[in-house]
Image (tube, rainbow, N blue to C red):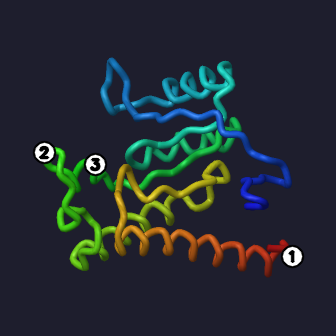
Amino acid sequence: EMKDGLMLLNGKRIVFKGVNRHEFDYKRGRAITAKEMLWDIKFMKQHNINAVRTSHYPNQSLWYDLCDRYGIYLIGETNLESHGSWQKLGKCEPSWNVPGNKPEWKENVLDRANSMFQRDKNHSAILIWSCGNESYAGTDILAMSNFFMLQIIQDLSIMKGLFGIVI
């Protein structure tokens, strides 16, 4: 819930003490084990970290299960990385923006958002749905943002009908 410019959870203000986390191990590369994920969670809890951004892509499903179980808030990030696509040699040219306002990108951008949302929508740890890393701006990112908002509103409407939740 947003109220007076604050994000609230169960009526209480959330203070994020967060980190970015890449799914990577110095021994195994991107092949992270459950034991390593649990070590990450426990290390974060010991250091009062309560939030993680899954930079720059969705993580293994087990990571979300562990965050649900251990009370770590998540910013679930779509696998859209357009870092630096809008700049070349210090110049910024709007026509370089990717995905920007390019109709040929819209379907792919929305497919990535939908795939992630459908996989992860039942994870209570996810408080924020990210449209990607440094995705800049434009109508395609706006469409992705609107998609996430519409999905959340629809889910809340269903819960309201089933459980009498007030929204």
Q: Name the residue under label 2.
A: 89
Q: Secondary structure beneath disc 3?
A: loop
Quarter holding the N terminus is: bottom right
Q: Secondary structure beneath disc 2?
A: loop
Mark 1 residue type: Gly
**What residue do we see at 42% from left, 42% from top?**
55
For mark 2, does the 10 Å Cα neighbourhood hold few (<14), some (14 to 19), or many (20 or more) residues? few
Q: Position of residue 151 (x, y in %)?
A: 57, 73
82 on left or right of 126: left
For mark 1, does the 10 Å Cα neighbourhood hold few (<14), some (14 to 19), or many (20 or more) residues? few
Mark 2 residue type: Leu
20 on left or right of 141: right
Name the one closer to the observer, 142 or 105.
Answer: 142
State which quadrant residue 74 falls in.
Answer: top right
Q: Name the residue under label 3.
A: 83
Q: Where is residue 165 in the image (x, y as percent from the top left)?
A: 84, 72
**What residue do we see at 23% from left, 65% from top?**
94
Nearer-N-terminus badge (1/3): 3
Q: Name the residue under label 1.
A: 164
Q: Do the residues labelled 3 and 2 touch (CB within 8 Å)?
A: no
Nearer-N-terminus badge (3/2): 3
Q: State the CA–CA distance, disc 1 to disc 3.
A: 43 Å
Name the one closer to the observer, 134 or 122.
Answer: 134
Q: State the CA–CA distance, disc 3 to disc 2.
A: 14 Å
Mark 3 residue type: His
Q: Where is residue 142 in the image (x, y as percent from the top left)?
A: 43, 71
- Give the label, 3 or 2, closer to the camera: 2
The correct choice, above or below, for 12 with respect to 159 in the image is above
Name the one closer to the observer, 159 or 151.
Answer: 151
